[in-house]
Every structure is written in structure tokens, then in C-alpha cells.
Amino acid sequence: MADTDKPLLIKRYASRRLYNTETSDYVTLEDIAGFIRDGREVQIVDLKTGDDLTRQYLLQIIAEHESRGESVLPVNVLNDLVRSYTTQATSVVPQFLAASFDMLREQQSKMVENMNSMTPMGKVPGMEAMQAQQEAFLKAMTGGLGQWKAPETGGSTETSGEGEDLDEIKKQLAELQEKLSRMK
């Protein structure tokens, strides 16, 4: 069984083929993307020189997804990233991005934890703080464009034609909250 605490070592041969050292077979960029989606860290090294090529291949994976229309990064964020390579802001950008993604992972983990314990969303500890952090992150990443606002946990969220469905969901949520209250 593979040690998932260590990065999966992928070796790149002179032929540019990528070799998974754990399973002793060749892999594609899509295979590597799958390992990462499954939570596995990877390290890609050149067999001949020993150079770490991980960054190059991760950027290539992102570029391929973006070129297929699976856009995650808005154009203005990509522009800011390019600018950060030509300004003295390069020392700040990596730390900002790392901290932002750490915060996002932490909040997602807390959200899943709270969902599993069946805590009603309106009473999730730290929900307001998480929403404020998300707003700040999105504002920073998009330069304030779009004026995204986290949905309110108590107000009306009706939109054209969906009111009846939302009312039914609200009713079911209220019933679940009542049942949970009685269980305590």
C-alpha cells in the first residue's frame, strides 16, 4: 500500500513520458490531475537532471483545463498574476494566495463537519465570519467586480418563478430544525 503522507514521485524521462514510481507505469497529465483531486500531493522530477518540474506540470494542467472552457480563474485575476511577475508585488502574491486557499480549505472542512452534525445553517458557529472572509477574498481576487454578497441566512431568497420551491424547502428545513430541537 502506498504511503499517502509522502508526495507521489513522478519521474519524467528524456522522451517526456511521465512514470509513476509507486505503480511502475506511465501516467498522463489527466492522471496526475486525478491524483491531486483525490487529495494526493505529487512531485515531478526530471530523471536525468533531478530538477523539480512540479510547478511547470501543475501550471500545464491548469492551462489545459482553462483552454477546454473549464474556467476557474477570471481574466482579471490572470491579468493580476501576470502583473505580479513584473512588479515588486511578487513577494506578497504567493503568501496571499496560499493564505486564501488555506482559509478556503479550512472553511470548507468546517462546513462539511457542521453539515455532518446536522447543525442548521443559521446556527453554524462562525458562519458570519466565514461569509465576511469569503466576501473579502472574492473582493480581493476580483478587484470588487461583480459586487458578490454572501446570501443572508434568514431573509427571503425568492427569485423569478422559484418562490414555491424555495417556500417548500424552507418549510422542510423548519420541520427538520424543530425535530432536532426536540431531540436535544
Image (cartoon, rainbow, N blue to C red):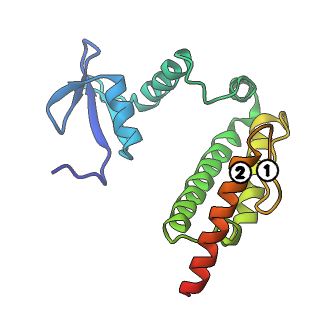
Q: Amino acid at mark 2?
A: Leu
Q: Is residue 17 above or below residue 9?
A: above
Q: Answer few, some or many: residues within 10 Å of disc 1's Cα (few below 14, many 20 plus, some between 14 and 19).
A: few
Identified at 69% across, 23% down, the residue is 82
Q: Which numbered disc flags the more N-terminal residue, 1 or 2? A: 1
Task: Estimate the x, y position of residue 81 in percent, counting from the top left.
Answer: 69, 28
Quadrant location, the C terminus: bottom right
CB atoms at circles 1 and 2 under 8 Å apart? Answer: yes
99 horizontally vs 62: left or right: right
Quarter of the image for residue 140 reads: top right
Q: Which residue is mark 1?
A: 157
Q: Residue at x 63, y 51 (%)?
A: 99
Which residue is rendered at x = 64% and y = 64% of the image?
A: 173
Type of amino acid at the residue the image marks with label 1 = Thr
- Circle 2 is placed at which residue position? 166
Q: In front here: 164 or 71?
A: 164
| 130 vs 89: above or below | below
Q: Which residue is found at the position 41% from the left and 31% from the top?
A: 54
**Helix or strand or loop: what does disc 1 sit on?**
loop
* Residue 41 on image: x %, y %: 37, 44
Measured along the vertical axis of the image, is residue 172 above or below residue 139?
Answer: below
